[in-house]
Image (tube, rainbow, N blue to C red):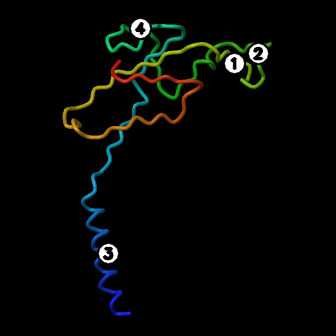
Amino acid sequence: MTTKHPLLLFLTFLTIGQILTAQQREISDLRTGWKFTKGLHELAFESNFDDAEWQDVVIPHDWAIEEPFVIDGDGNTGKLPWKGEGWYRKQLDIPDHYKGKRLYLLFDGIMAFPVIYVNG
């Protein structure tokens, strides 16, 4: 029984050391600063695309809810005109001190068949 205590003590210190030296995660809120438009824009994925005329939106955003109900529409969609293509864009500047670090983009929910472009 006494041989287990040094092992337990060693594992405790090892765990504490790993916790103290672990990198802290930085989380950035990206809900603001988005641009949106409906319709087909074949070059909107390009990083230098001009989106100045697009609508400013805050995420989460549901463009279908802004449109009138479709009386004879599908009841499964809440009779909302959700079909079609919509584009969201955001300019994201990553500071130099992140170079060589791993970054994650987490989207909590995206409606139907998303395609995501980063850097064009």
Q: Which mark is residue 73?
A: 2
Name the residue tied to disc 3: 11
Residue toward you, 44 or 89:
44
Q: Quadrant of residue 47?
A: top left
N-terminal of the two: label 2 or label 1? 2
Q: How crowded is mark 1: few (under 14 residues within 10 Å), some or many (20 or more)?
A: some
N-terminal of the two: label 3 or label 1? 3
Numbered disc in front, either 2 or 3: 3
Q: Residues within 10 Å of mark 2 (few under 14, many from 20)?
A: few
Numbered disc in front, either 1 or 4: 4
Asked if disc 2 and disc 1 are in contact, CB closer than 8 Å, the reply is yes
Name the residue tied to disc 1: 80
Residue at 35% x, 18% y is: 120
Name the residue tied to disc 4: 43
Q: How crowded is mark 3: few (under 14 residues within 10 Å), some or many (20 or more)?
A: few
Is 75 left or right of 8, judged from the image as shown? right
N-terminal of the two: label 4 or label 3? 3
Is 60 left or right of 72, judged from the image as shown? left
**Location of the N terminus (image quadrant):** bottom left
